[in-house]
Amino acid sequence: MSERRVGTVSRGIRCPIFREGDDLAEMAVDSVLKAGESDGFEIRDRDILCITESVVARCQGNYATVDDIAADVRAKLGGETIGIVWPIFSRNRFSICLKGMAKGAKKVVVMLSYPTDEVGNSLVSEEQIAASGVNPYTDVLDEKKYRELFGYNKHRFTGVDYVEFYGELIREMGAEAEIIFANKAEAILDYTKNVINCDIHTRFSTRKKLKELGANVWGMDEILNAPVNGSGYNEDYGLLGTNKSTEGVVKLFPRDCQPLVDEIQKKMLEKTGKHIEVMVYGDGAFKDPVGKIWELADPVVSPAYTSGLEGTPNELKLKYLADDKYSELSGEELKAAVSKAIAEKTSESLVGNMASEGTTPRQFTDLIGSLCDLTSGSGDKGTPIVYIQGYFDNYTTGK
């Protein structure tokens, strides 16, 4: 048998346009098998079929309207003055949620973090902060002071001044708007005790602190965590992970994904005789070096995956083996020594072992989700399924 020369391959799979009620498991399997026939690749054990959360939610019909959000906010926070703490700056992710929140209240006090939001979207630059003399860790600014210090600042990618944009959205919904800037959660309590904390990855500690201070606080993950008037919902994440569908509708993060990935795995085994892994993915977990934006605006990278994707990589660093441990070897001798080291590596964690230094101790699902997000893109590629081969291979596989 000839030596295999290709390692990991990530393929975007073109699919039909998915609609509510479609048999997603059957269509996903069919799309991959047809792609294999047309592109000439075979299904192998431990391949990974990854499907974007967006089409899962669409097939589930997991949508909610501004009115649905407003009804839940009104029921939980009383319909008077509410505080909205640390939303991200996003037309796609947050604007429709904000409309619903504003429609469920008479006044909305939005507290924005500065100089950036949680995922790195910038309101003002670090240079502006330094020149202003403001201490962002302690200082609370109102909108007037913010404008005096920083003026109008448009997001470098969207061209939107989010202070102005969010204020206008609130007023469009018939509520009074006030915007403040602070990086300590308790600052909102000077304005109202009825609070929605909108941070994503720090939400539990924020909510705990505000509750201890007597606030009636609900997280975004607790808004629409159950149906309202027949709406979509997500019992684990509520409004977190939503995306704009229309000007009055959001698509929620998908729910009940585990049965789907298990069914796809089962169908692939039945049709090909191969045991593949399956996961649903949302945002990748990486940071843009230019815009400084951390991509992960979803609550998790993967809401569901098959058991073979548990854990973290357990890898040796080839450059260490080649440059240090076996520096005196070359050619076939070096190749044989490195192959032997990989074949004999312990199945236990290599954390702390010099030969693994520099390898990435991240969850498989976070690494694979990032690969998928970059492969499928967020535009018009039409590849909501990503099929990955060779991910679990190493230097010795296929020799």
Image (cartoon, rainbow, N blue to C red):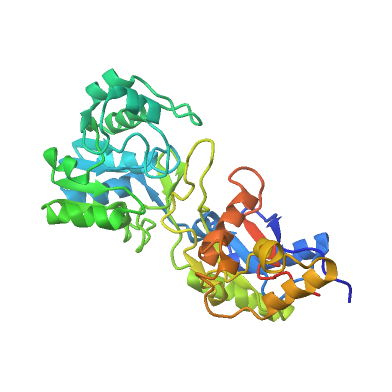
Q: Is residue 23 visible?
A: no
165 sits left or right of 6 in the view: left
Q: Residue at x 46, y 50 (%)?
A: 296
285 sits left or right of 332 in the view: left
On the image, the x and y values in percent for residue 270 come to 68, 81
Q: Quadrant of the N terminus?
A: bottom right
On the image, the x and y values in percent for residue 354 come to 56, 67
264 sits left or right of 82 in the view: right
Above or below: residue 32 compared with residue 17:
below
Closer to the camera in the image, 25 or 155: 155
On the image, the x and y values in percent for residue 43 come to 74, 71
**Which residue occupies the extreme right position in the image?**
2
Above or below: residue 53 compared with residue 186:
below
On the image, the x and y values in percent for residue 108 come to 22, 36
Q: In which image quadrant can residue 176 be found?
A: top left
Q: In which image quadrant can residue 49 be found?
A: bottom right
Above or below: residue 209 compared with residue 352:
above
Q: In which image quadrant can residue 120 be found?
A: top left
Q: Residue at x 51, y 72 (%)?
A: 311
Closer to the camera in the image, 10 or 236: 10
Q: Residue at x 58, y 61 (%)?
A: 368
Q: Quadrant of the C terminus?
A: bottom right
Q: Is residue 249 visible?
A: yes
